[in-house]
Amino acid sequence: MEAMSSAAIAALTLYDMAKGLEKSMVIEGVKLVRKTGGKSGIFQRED
């Protein structure tokens, strides 16, 4: 969860730096691809 939050914050930071050039940018596609450990075990997205 922390990694997903960090990725989203990084994307928003890039948006903030580039908004002067292009305000119509879109941030999308932040999703969990693979996870290991924890109570629920291993997760692998099947796209």
Image: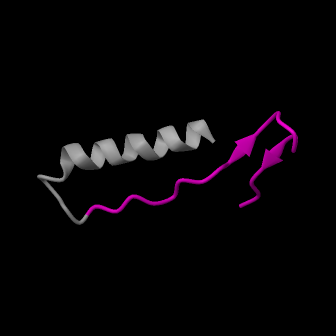
Image mark count: 0
Residue sticking out furthest to the bottom: 24
Main secondary structure along the magenta-highlighted residues: loop
Residue sticking out furthest to the left: 20
Q: Is residue 44 left or right of residue 9?
A: right
Q: Residue at x 48, y 41 (%)?
A: 7
Q: Quadrant of residue 39?
A: top right
Q: Which residues are magenta?
A: 25-47
Q: Indicate the position of residue 8 as horizontal and vertical percent values.
A: 46, 47
Q: Is residue 12 above or below residue 38?
A: below
What's the colour scheme? one colour
Q: Indicate the position of residue 9 as horizontal and vertical percent values.
A: 41, 43
The quarter of the image holding the N terminus is: top right
The quarter of the image holding the C terminus is: bottom right
Q: Indicate the position of residue 25 as horizontal and vertical percent values.
A: 28, 61
- Residue 9 lies within the magenta run: no
Question: In the image shown, does 37 or 22 lie closer to the viewer?
Answer: 37
Q: Quadrant of residue 46?
A: bottom right
Q: Residue at x 20, y 48 (%)?
A: 18
Q: Is residue 36 left or right of residue 25?
A: right
Q: Indicate the position of residue 13 as horizontal and vertical percent values.
A: 31, 42
Q: Is residue 9 left or right of residue 37?
A: left
Q: Is residue 13 left or right of residue 22?
A: right
Q: Residue at x 81, y 47 (%)?
A: 43
